[in-house]
Structure formats: structure tokens, C-alpha cells
Image: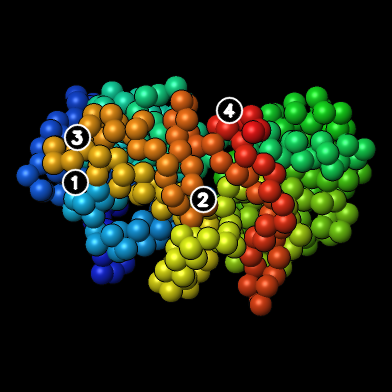
Amino acid sequence: MGYRRSVIAVAGALTIALAGCGGSAVTGNDNSDTGADGGPVKIGFLVPKSGVYASIGTDLERAMQVYLEEHENQLGGREVEMVVIDEGSTPQTGTAAARRLVQQEQVAAVTGIVNSATAVGVATVFSDAKVPVISTAQVTENPYWWRVGWTNPMMNTSIVDYLVREEKDKSVYLIGADYKQGHDIIEAVKGGLEAGGVEIAGEAFTPFGTTQDFQPYLSEIRNSGADSVYAFYAGAEAASFVTQYSQFGLSGEATLYGNQALTEGTLSAQGTAASGVLTNSIYTPQIDSPVNKAFVDAYVAKFDAQPSVYSEAQYASAAVLDKAIAAIGDGAVTGEAINGALPDIGDIETPRGTWRFDAAQAPTQTIYLRRATETGGVMTNEVIAELGVYTSEGQSS
């Protein structure tokens, strides 16, 4: 088994090299010298470089490069060494990579991680080693896991609240990928819609990571007579589903809604097929603020592409680490020291706005409703409404 490893350099693209990995169990993480005496702080960066989530992994790496270049390759005033390893596409590959980070690389903290199934598999590897993780992945009730993006409850509740208002007298068809995250999302949305009196026209789950032809499922949607469709897909699957949905002619028959993953990082691949798709999200490049404008300008200048919600979340992860490491002062930057600083870092200003961690170690923040639109020959997710401020537990305030 091979692992992609690199150090993020300020002056250029990531340099990737292969490294082997031993298979021994984690015995602890002796990172007591990390960052001592002004030395570099070693941070693990676990990202997918292959499989269905590879495009999301690219967004994460790009955002990390932008942040480090803006901060002269420092976090909290300390020089950092980013150890980049391929998350892979399964919990097994992710767990092996996690063990390498804590046992051989002895990192002080970890960021990245996209696949929710992988996150569940690696969570105890990191917490047992007392290494904090700053990630968008949905791990709860783990004192060393800090969610910087969104939570399933805030995303599910915000779209359900909207659909109950807007689709009260209509029917909604539900479809998603057949794995834990897909079932969790679809079942939560279904329960909320039913409680709100919205008719469920049908439900389907497609084989995760292997479905290339969605036509049989699209036929079922058409035959159901649904007024709207709520879909949960990400990465390559999202690109294929949205494209085929349009090609099948359903765009003019049933409004397509989805979690932000449906059009994140895939709009260029989907093209005009995504026009009119509605998603709820914590972020869009069109947010009007100095912080967001600076981030978007830097990202576009470097990569000739718009940042996605995943890009912003990784940028926010870097900002969180920046504040936590700065709070440690001149001491050794260990996993325990970073984790101890995180609860008290206060307001975090990022391109999406200003937020702070709640007791569940996740943000309370504004959720937006977006519509995929072609502007000047470029597909973007324009904000058409603010759905409200939601807590990590899905409560509106």
C-alpha cells in the first residue's frame, strides 16, 4: 500500500512523493517536542486524492495553500510542516493513513478528512493519541474532534423548514447514495417533511461510488409524479446525477433541491445542466465581505477557479489552528495543548462570516439558499435567501 506525502510549500504547488507505511498498532503519540524552541509544528493533512471525493480533496489542498501563503507558511506565528497523506476511498485506507500520522509522523494536529465513513473509523485513532482533528467530517461526542463546516442537523433542518413552507401542498421524491451518510441525510429530511405535512412521492438509494447510469432511477422519479426532488450526492456522483437529471428532461418537470454537496466543486463539470438547482449551504463566493473578497481574489488568481464550500471550510480550519497555536504562546505545541486552547479561541472570522464553536464543538452560523446560475459564461451558486441562523443541533435562532 502506498501513501502520498508532501510538505506544503509557500512558493509552489504541492510536491507529492510515495512513502511506505508500517502496519503496527498505535502505541501513542510522543509529540512533546513539536514546535518547541521555535521549531516547525507538524500538522497532518489527510485528504482524498483518488476516488469519488478526489475533487473535494483538491479544493482542500488549494485552500490550505492560499492560507499558508498569506501567512508566510506559519500558523500561530510558528513555522509549520504539513504532512499530506492520501485519505483513500475506504475506512480501511483512511485508518492506515491515520495510524501513520500519529505513530510515525507524530503530528500535533490533523485537518482534512472528507468521507464520513472514514472519519468514524479514524476518530478513535486520533483521540487515543490525544491529537485534535479540525475537519468538516461529522464525528460527534469525541473531545478531540472539532467540526468547522456544518452539521447534519443544521443542514437538514434548514432545508426542511424551507420545503415545508414552499412545498406544503406538493410532493417530494428523495434519492441519495447508499451508504451511512446518504441514509442519515435522506432519512432525516424524510422525517422532517412528513412531520411538516409534505407528501413523500418516493425514495431510492443508489449503489455508492459505482452508479454510472441513473436512468432507471430517473424514470422512477418521473413516474412518481413528484413536484420536487431532494438529492444527496457529492463529488463525481453529484456531477453525474445532476447532468443526467437535466439530460433526462426532469429539470423542467421537478425542481431539484440538494445539500450543498450536490453542486460543490462540480459546477464546472455539470455546466448549464445544473442551472436552477437549489442547495442550502454555509458559503458561496458571492458573500459580500472584505474577508471573503480577499479570499476569492487570491484563490481565483492562483487556481483560475472559484472556491467551493469545501475550500472555505479548509481555509477556516487553518484559521482555527492559527488561533489555537497562537494561544499556546511559547510552549511546546502538542496535541493536548492545541486541544486545550480550542474551547477558548472565541470568534473566528472566515470568508463565510464570523462564528464560534458551541458546546458540541461545531459552529452556529447562517445558512443560505443558493441557486446554480450561469453568469458571464461561468456557473455560480448565487444566494437567493438567508434561511436563518442555525445551531449545530439544528435549532434556528
Q: Residue at x 40, y 58 (%)?
A: 63
Q: Earlier in the sequence, mark 1 or mark 2?
A: 1
Q: Residues within 10 Å of mark 1 (few under 14, many from 20)?
A: many
Q: Earlier in the sequence, mark 4 or mark 3?
A: 3
Residue at disc 2, secondary structure:
strand
Residue 176 percent location from the top left of the image: 68, 40
* Residue of label 2: 353
Left or right: 173 in relation to 313: right
Residue 117 percent location from the top left of the image: 48, 33
Is the Cβ of the residue at disc 3 closer than 8 Å to that at disc 2? no
Mark linked to residue 41: 1
Q: Residue at x 30, y 64 (%)?
A: 69
Mark linked to residue 237: none
In whole angstroms, how far apart are the C-alphas of marks 1 and 2?
A: 27 Å
Q: Is residue 119 visible?
A: no
Residue at disc 1, secondary structure:
strand
* Residue of label 3: 334
Residue 388 percent location from the top left of the image: 67, 41
